[in-house]
Image (tube, rainbow, N blue to C red):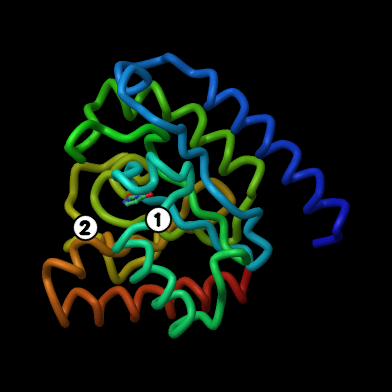
Amino acid sequence: MSMVGIDARARALEALAGEIAACHGCELAATRTKTVPGTGTGSSGICVVGEAPGAREDQVGEPFVGRSGQLLDRLLDEELGLTRSEIAIVNVVKCRPPANRAPKPAEVSACGGFLERQLEVLSPGVIVTLGNVATRLLLRTTEGITTLRGKTFPYGSTVVVPTFHPAAALRGGADILASMRADLVRAKEVAQCS
Ligand code: URA
């Protein structure tokens, strides 16, 4: 992509971040410290979609800057040879749910338009969904991540590669981590073909 393309993309994402900062579309607006619109323009063609900001993300205003984020950064480096600056990272929900509870359906649906528009602007070659919330939303399914991972799914003109959420790997150990590594390698192969 040309630098003009990346500049235009960055401007469009910044405009969306402004809309997100002003949003009071659900009850999470009342308890958030900062909105967390996402980072990166996705020059590698890869977009990662997480669930919702946690405590640290809420303070900093950036996705995946806590323990899950450190693991994500390590996997991106070791399996894809990429830094987070080359990847777009967004969440389904842009404000922290209190006490890190799962986002409610009303919150997911209030924020859904922002995610859709971010994906339109980013136009990634591959979308890596982390965990159940992001995967179920994009694939419009109630199946769980354990069933869905290890496969690729069409999503408009792009492809979704579902994998576990890094928080699950932090809790669950070696098998989950190995699956995440394999899924990221698959995502890289898809991105290179797109
Ligand atoms: N977990 C997520 O799903 N997103 C973040 O930004 C941080 C932790």
Is 95 rendered above or below residue 173? Answer: above
In the rendered structure, the answer to whether residue 32 lies left or right of residue 120 reads left
> Label 1: which residue?
64
Secondary structure of the residue carrying tag 1 is loop
Q: Residue, x 34% and y 71% (percent of image)?
A: 71
Is 23 rendered above or below residue 36? Answer: above
Amino acid carrying mark 2 in the image = Ile
Give coordinates of residue 40: x percent, y percent.
61, 54
Q: Nearer the viewer, residue 71 or 150?
A: 71
- The CA distance from mark 1 to mark 2 is 19 Å
Is 120 rendered above or below residue 126? Answer: above
Q: Residue, x 53% and y 25% (percent of image)?
A: 21
Query: Based on the displayed image, in which of its 4 quarters is residue 141 positioned?
Result: top left
Q: Quadrant of the N terminus?
A: bottom right
Label 2, residues with CA under 10 Å away: few <14, some 14-19, many ≥20 = many
In the rendered structure, the answer to whether residue 163 lies left or right of residue 3 reads left
Q: Nearer the viewer, residue 35 or 116?
A: 35
Give coordinates of residue 106: x percent, y percent.
28, 21
Q: Nearer the viewer, residue 176 or 120?
A: 176
Amino acid carrying mark 1 in the image = Phe
Look at the numbered disc 1 and say if its residue's Cβ is closer than 8 Å to ligand 1. Answer: yes
> Label 2: which residue?
145
Q: Residue, x 45% and y 45% (percent of image)?
A: 60
Look at the numbered disc 2 and say if its residue's Cβ is closer than 8 Å to ligand 1. Answer: no
Of marks 1 and 2, the one in the foreground: 1
Secondary structure of the residue carrying tag 2 is helix
